[in-house]
Amino acid sequence: MAISMTKVQPLMEAKGLKKYDLRKTGFNPNIIDKVLSGPLNKSKRVDTETINRLCALLNCQPGDIMEYVPDGDGG
C-alpha cells in the first residue's frame, strides 16, 4: 500500500505553478522531488507540515493532492 501524490502535478499546472515556484516559497528540492515522483513508500516519506504547506499554497484539501492506493493483495 502507498499514498499516491500524483494529483499534485496536475493541480500545480492548473494553477500555473512550476517546481521553481515551490522552491521560491521555501520547499526543499528533495521534498519537491519526493512529492512529484509518484507513490510514496517507506523511503519516501512526506510529513504533515509539507502537506499543510502544499495545501495552503494550492488552496486545496489533502484529498485534492493525495490518495491511498492499496497493494491489491487483499490485506
Image (cartoon, grey):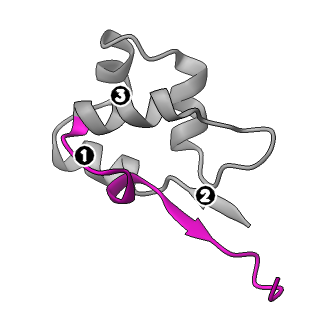
How busy is the neighbourhood of tag 3: few (under 14 within 10 Å), some, or many (20 plus)? Answer: some
- For the point 51% across and 42% down, the residue is 36
Tell me the residue that label 1 is attached to: 13
Quadrant occupied by the N terminus: bottom right
Check residue 53 in the rendering and tell me which mark sits there, or answer none.
3
Of the numbered discs 3 and 1, the one sitting upstream in the chain is 1
Label 3 element class: helix
What residue is at 44 percent from the left and 17 percent from the top?
Answer: 27
Q: Which mark is residue 3?
A: 2
Q: Do the numbered discs 1 and 2 sit on residues whose CB atoms are within 8 Å?
A: no
Q: Which residues are magenta?
A: 58-75
Q: Secondary structure at mark 1?
A: helix
Q: In terms of secondary structure, where does tag 2 sit?
A: strand
Locate residue 34 relative to residue 22 in the image: left or right: right
Indicate the amino acid at tag 2.
Ile
Image height of 45 relative to 62, above or below: above
For residue 15, what is the image quadrant? top left
Q: Nearer the viewer, residue 67 or 9?
A: 67
Q: Earlier in the sequence, mark 3 or mark 2?
A: 2
Which three-letter amino acid code belongs to the residue tagged 1? Answer: Glu
